């Protein structure tokens, strides 16, 4: 049980954007210096990790959520809406830099996936946001391969293995059904592919 919780924590959705940006900078050569890389990473980390944690602390304090794991659909609505806004801002931010414009795809793709999930909430169907983030990361590196034409097969294999491990952990913890896990991954993946063909 403890191992499954650890896996869910390490591969939490709020961690994945920072990992994605870090991998992007490792894979692609740009004209930016180390300080600028650090600044971009700090912006993403604060926006997608620190702010969501502070939001959850605030929501717990005012009684809007019962736990930081936000199990119910109702508890997920406010955090998801805030994340939609954050990802929209980050997408617009990275889109203005021509040399790293591809980074905006990561945020726009995940944004579309989160909007889809928000509408699915209206049908009282829950999806795994953990697997959504993994599907989104997997999809993003597929389109990154298409855009900058570099071999990233090892990264895709690692993401697929981690997705399987994470899905297994979420099921073992009984926080999701198989349908919710598969749905999350597929929505995350399709969001990235949709953005690629739209932009």
Image (tube, rainbow, N blue to C red):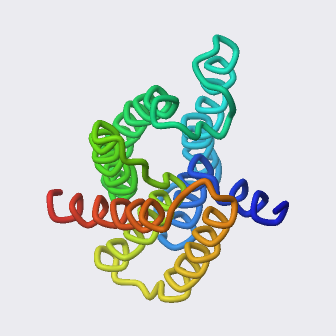
In the image, farthest residue toward the right: 2
Point out residue 21 in the picture as x, y percentages from the top left corner.
53, 57
Eyeballing the image, is 25 above or below 55?
A: below
Observer-nearest residue: 24 or 15? 15
Eyeballing the image, is 163 above or below 17?
A: below
Point out residue 175 in the picture as x, y percentages from the top left corner.
61, 53
Eyeballing the image, is 151 above or below 25?
A: below
Left of 24 or right of it: where is 52? right
Left of 48 or right of it: where is 190? left
Left of 126 or right of it: where is 161? right
Observer-nearest residue: 53 or 17? 53
In the image, farthest residue toward the left: 198
Residue 5 lies in quadrant: bottom right
Point out residue 68 in the picture as x, y percentages from the top left corner.
68, 34
Point 55% across, 35% down: residue: 47
Point 42% across, 65% down: residue: 179
Looking at the rendered image, the quarter that the N terminus falls into is bottom right
Number of marks in picture: 0
Point 48% across, 88% down: residue: 153
Observer-nearest residue: 16 or 178? 178
Looking at the rendered image, the quarter that the C terminus falls into is bottom left
């Amino acid at each position: 049980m403890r191992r499954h919780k650890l896996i869910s924590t390490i591969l939490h959705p709020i961690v994945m954007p920072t990992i994605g940006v870090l991998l992007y900078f490792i894979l692609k050569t740009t004209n930016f210096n180390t300080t600028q890389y650090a600044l971009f990473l700090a912006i993403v980390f604060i926006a997608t990790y620190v702010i969501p944690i502070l939001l959850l602390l605030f929501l717990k304090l005012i009684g809007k959520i019962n736990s930081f794991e936000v199990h119910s659909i109702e508890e997920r609505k406010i955090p998801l809406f805030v994340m939609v806004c954050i990802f929209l801002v980050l997408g617009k931010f990275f889109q203005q830099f021509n040399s790293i414009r591809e980074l905006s795809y990561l945020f726009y793709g995940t944004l579309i996936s989160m909007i889809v999930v928000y509408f699915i909430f209206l049908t009282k169907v829950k999806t795994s946001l953990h697997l959504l983030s993994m599907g989104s990361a997997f999809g993003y590196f597929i389109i990154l391969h298409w855009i900058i034409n570099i071999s990233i097969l090892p990264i895709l294999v690692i993401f697929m293995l981690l997705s399987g491990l994470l899905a297994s952990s979420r099921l073992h913890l009984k926080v999701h059904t198989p349908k919710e896990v598969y749905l999350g991954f597929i929505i995350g993946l399709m969001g990235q592919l949709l953005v690629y063909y739209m932009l």
